[in-house]
Image (spheres, helix red, strand yellow):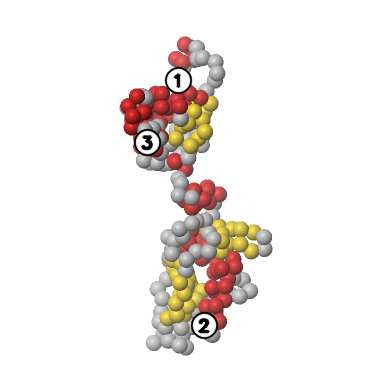
C-alpha cells in the first residue's frame, strides 16, 4: 500500500525529487528550518497527491544532499538523513533541528541569503528578523545591548510622560538600570554607592526582564517598539520649556 503524507506544514516540506540543477529549491528550506523551529524535508512525495512516489538510487541522492548542505549552507547546521518506506517507493527524510548558531545562510554565486519558515513556505528573511537572529547567534538580545550613552546625556521625557498617563506610574532612574549593571559592583561597593551615582557612572543598559521592559509593554500595549535615547541639550532648560509638555505619540505613530 502506498504511504500517503497528510500535508506540508511549518515544520514539513515535500519535494518530488532531489533537484540537482536547482538545489536552492530545497536548500532554502534547510536554511529556514535551521533559522526557526526546525523541520523535515521529505523527498519522493508527489506535490499534488502527497503520495510517496519514491526516489531512484537513494544512496546517491543522500550523498548529494549531504554534500550540498556542507558546500552551500553556512554555518553548517546539524542534520540527519533517513530512508523510509518500501524499496520501490522509499522516501528520503532530511531532518533539520533548530540551529544553535543562527543565522544559517544559503550561499551560492557570490550571494548569501537567509530564510525563515512562514506557514508552509520558506521565505527570504527580513532585515529586522535577520538582526534578531544575529544577536541570538551570539547569545544576546536587543534589550541587553549597551547604548553607549551615559544617563547624564540621555532624556526619556516622552517615555516618562507616556508611562504616567497610561499606567499611572512614574519611571525612576533606578528602573533604567539593569540587574546586570548592579551586579558589576562588588557587594561592599554597592552598599556605599546609591543608584543615582551608579546610573551616572555606567552607560544606559536596557534589560529584557527589567522594569523598563514592563513599562514599555504597558505603554505600547504589549508591542515592542524601539526606544532611542535622545541626547539632551547642553543648555539648561528654562522654566517655560519645562512647563510645556511634549506631544505624546500614539503607538501607531511613535517613531522608532
Element type where label 2 sits in the image: helix
Residue 83, horizontal then vertical, whole percent: 45, 80
First in residue order: circle 1 vs circle 3: 3
Asked whether the residues under the numbered discs 2 and 3 touch, taking CB atoms below 8 Å apart as contact, a structural biologist would say no
Question: Which residue shows up at 33% across the image and 32% down it?
Answer: 187
Residue bearing the label numbered 3: 183
- Left or right: 109, with 83 as reference point: right
| Residue of label 2 | 58
* CA distance separating discs 2 and 3: 57 Å
Query: Residue 101: where, in percent of width, then height?
Result: 48, 57
Residue for badge 1:
245
Asked whether disc 2 touches disc 1, contact meaning CB atoms under 8 Å apart, the reply is no
In the rendering, at what x and y percent does residue 118 appear?
47, 59
Q: Is residue 8 above or below residue 132?
A: below
Give the secondary structure at mark 1.
Answer: loop
**Left or right of residue 94: residue 213:** left
Mark 1 or mark 2, which is nearer the start of the sequence? 2
221 left or right of 42 in image = left
Residue located at (47% from left, 69% from top): 79
State whether residue 24 is above or below residue 253. Answer: below
Q: Position of residue 65 (x, y in %)?
A: 54, 74
**Res. 170 image quadrant:** top left
Amino acid at each position: 500500500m502506498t504511504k500517503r503524507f497528510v500535508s506540508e506544514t511549518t515544520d514539513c516540506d515535500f519535494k518530488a525529487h532531489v533537484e540537482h540543477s536547482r538545489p536552492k529549491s530545497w536548500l532554502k528550506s534547510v536554511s529556514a528550518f535551521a533559522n526557526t523551529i526546525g523541520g523535515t524535508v521529505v523527498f519522493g512525495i508527489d506535490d499534488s497527491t502527497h503520495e510517496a512516489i519514491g526516489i531512484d538510487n537513494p544512496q546517491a541522492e543522500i550523498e548529494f544532499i549531504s554534500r550540498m548542505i556542507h558546500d552551500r549552507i553556512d554555518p553548517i547546521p546539524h542534520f540527519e538523513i533517513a530512508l523510509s518506506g518500501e524499496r520501490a517507493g522509499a522516501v528520503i527524510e532530511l531532518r533539520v533541528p533548530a540551529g544553535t548558531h543562527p543565522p544559517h545562510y544559503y550561499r551560492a554565486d557570490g550571494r548569501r541569503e537567509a530564510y525563515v519558515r512562514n506557514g508552509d513556505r520558506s521565505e527570504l528573511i527580513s532585515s529586522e528578523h535577520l538582526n534578531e537572529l544575529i544577536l541570538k547567534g551570539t547569545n544576546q538580545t536587543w534589550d541587553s545591548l549597551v547604548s553607549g550613552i551615559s544617563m547624564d546625556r540621555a532624556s526619556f521625557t516622552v517615555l516618562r510622560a507616556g508611562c504616567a498617563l497610561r499606567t499611572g506610574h512614574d519611571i525612576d532612574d533606578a528602573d533604567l538600570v539593569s540587574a546586570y549593571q548592579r551586579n558589576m559592583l562588588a557587594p561592599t561597593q554597592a552598599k556605599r554607592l546609591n543608584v543615582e551615582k551608579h546610573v551616572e557612572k555606567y552607560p544606559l543598559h536596557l534589560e529584557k526582564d527589567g522594569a523598563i521592559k514592563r513599562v514599555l509593554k504597558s505603554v505600547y500595549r504589549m508591542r515592542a517598539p524601539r526606544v532611542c535615547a535622545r541626547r539632551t541639550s547642553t543648555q539648561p532648560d528654562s522654566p517655560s520649556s519645562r512647563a510645556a509638555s511634549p506631544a505624546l505619540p500614539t503607538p501607531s505613530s511613535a517613531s522608532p
